[in-house]
Image: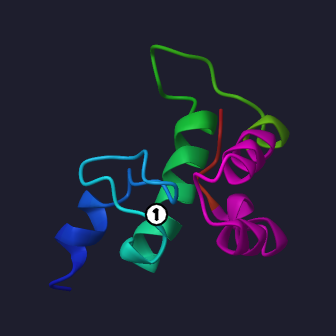
Amino acid sequence: MRNIPEIARSHHEKLNGSGYPYGMTGDQIPIQSKIMTISDIYDALTAADRPYKKATSVEQALDILDYERKAGNIDGTLLALFVEAHVYERTRPRR
């Protein structure tokens, strides 16, 4: 529980060091933050309750996540687990 602030603080970091707030790379980023990053991006893309943009489809969101993987921004192994385990199907209902 004491690592929660660091995990939350690091979830905008990218594997290639282009994230924030620290510019961490690869193994410097806690695995929990890497998981949170994938979940956060997926949620931001598919959330129907965002007044400033329309939600994307699950397929579009997964394509965007794959693009982020190819760009070196997110962990490919964790993304594969997210997709293969259909974690995205366990999210709150979309409108």
The x and y percentages for residue 28 are: 37, 74
Magenta region: which residues? 62-90
On the image, which quarter does residue 10 sit in? bottom left
Residue 72 covered by magenta stretch = yes
The residue to which callout 1 is attached is: 36
Q: Going by the image, does 90 lie left or right of 12? A: right
Q: Going by the image, does 84 lie left or right of 23? A: right
Residue drawn at x 74%, y 75% as measured from the top left: 81
Q: Going by the image, does 5 lie left or right of 44? A: left
Of residues 15 and 43, the one drawn nearer to the viewer in this rendering: 15
- Label 1 sits on what residue type? Met
The x and y percentages for residue 93 are: 64, 48
Of residues 88 and 35, the one drawn nearer to the viewer in this rendering: 35
The quarter of the image holding the N terminus is: bottom left
The x and y percentages for residue 27 are: 45, 77
State the scheme by which the image is colored.
Answer: rainbow
Examine the residues drawn in magenta and state their main secondary structure. helix
